[in-house]
């Protein structure tokens, strides 16, 4: 395994990353077979996830491990709201509900935010590094599949970041500045695998077309 924490994260999640790339929803995105309705569900799900994640990061940003991955230019909640307006109209807030997989995902973020704050780093790593990497390819595929230019894909636009590759290395350098011991590093890598699994769970639910049950989630 690599020496630095960012190398450990990359190597530790390599296998699960190739699994998510082979996932049915990912394939449907790549082959242009994804439907408008599936994209609506995806973006609606992201609204809950990022609302909870970004609140947790905000609340804990004095924590050394959170500070390292907290960058204002990454925050997605406001961008997602623009997409929700596009997909669901003015009443979007009343139209969207967190599905079971989203509730489980959000619950985990809330849990680590209370009891294992250092693991928030894994949640930020998987989502934001994913959005800055594969996310940029996904944006193109979705645009082609649904004939969208920019509206509806604001989520994937990082307007405040000029050079995405440079930013990715800054993000990793931030992670590598943390003095994490072996045991903590191990738990952080394990959590990142869990985060991938939570994302796979959400993808599978969208493909199955599970009914979205109505629950309130305070975001
Ligand atoms: C079809 C779907 C996907 C494709 C084609 C894809 C592709 C890629 C590519 C090309 C990279 C850059 C690798 C590098 O710089 O060495 C990357 C990195 C990454 N992706 Fe994905 N990805 C996909 C889905 C996802 C999903 C759904 C997530 C998260 C839930 C994710 C999380 C990540 C992370 C965390 C990295 C950063 C790895 C690192 O450099 O540490 N990816 N992805």
Image (cartoon, grey):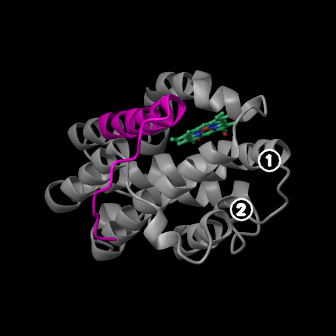
Of residues 37 and 140, the one drawn nearer to the viewer in this rendering:
37
Q: Which residues are magenta?
A: 190-219
Q: Are marks 2 and 1 in contact (CB under 8 Å)?
A: yes
**Which quadrant of the render holds ligand 1?**
top right
Of residues 62 and 123, the one drawn nearer to the viewer in this rendering:
123
Residue 47 position in % (x across, y down): 48, 62
Q: Reply yes or no: does residue 215 show up in magenta.
A: yes
**Residue 71 in view in this figure:** no
- Residue of label 2: 152
Give the secondary structure at mark 2: loop
Q: Residue at x 55, y 75 (%)?
A: 78
Q: Residues within 10 Å of mark 1 (few under 14, many from 20)?
A: some
- Residue of label 1: 146
Q: Is residue 213 left or right of residue 82?
A: left
Q: Is residue 101 left or right of residue 151?
A: left
**Residue 87 in view in this figure:** yes
**Residue 193 occupies quadrant:** top left
């Amino acid at each position: 395994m690599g020496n630095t924490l960012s190398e450990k994260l990359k190597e530790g999640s390599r296998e699960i990353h190739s699994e998510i790339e082979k996932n049915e929803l990912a394939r449907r995105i790549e082959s242009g077979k994804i439907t408008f309705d599936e994209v609506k569900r995806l973006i609606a799900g992201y609204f809950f996830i990022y609302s909870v994640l970004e609140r947790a990061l905000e609340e804990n940003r004095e924590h050394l491990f959170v500070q390292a991955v907290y960058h204002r230019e990454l925050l997605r909640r406001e961008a997602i709201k623009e997409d929700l307006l596009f997909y669901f109209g003015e009443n979007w807030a009343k139209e969207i509900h967190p599905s079971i997989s989203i509730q489980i995902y959000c619950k985990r973020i809330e849990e680590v935010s209370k009891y294992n704050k250092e693991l928030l780093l894994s949640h930020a790593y998987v989502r934001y590094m994913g959005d800055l990497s594969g996310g940029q390819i996904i944006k193109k595929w979705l645009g082609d599949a649904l004939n969208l230019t920019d509206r509806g894909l604001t989520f994937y636009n990082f307007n405040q970041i000029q050079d995405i590759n440079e930013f990715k290395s800054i993000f990793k350098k931030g992670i590598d500045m943390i003095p994490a011991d072996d045991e903590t590093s191990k738990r952080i890598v394990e959590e990142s695998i869990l985060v991938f699994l939570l994302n796979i769970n959400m993808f599978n639910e969208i493909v199955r077309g599970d009914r979205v049950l109505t629950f309130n989630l305070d975001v």
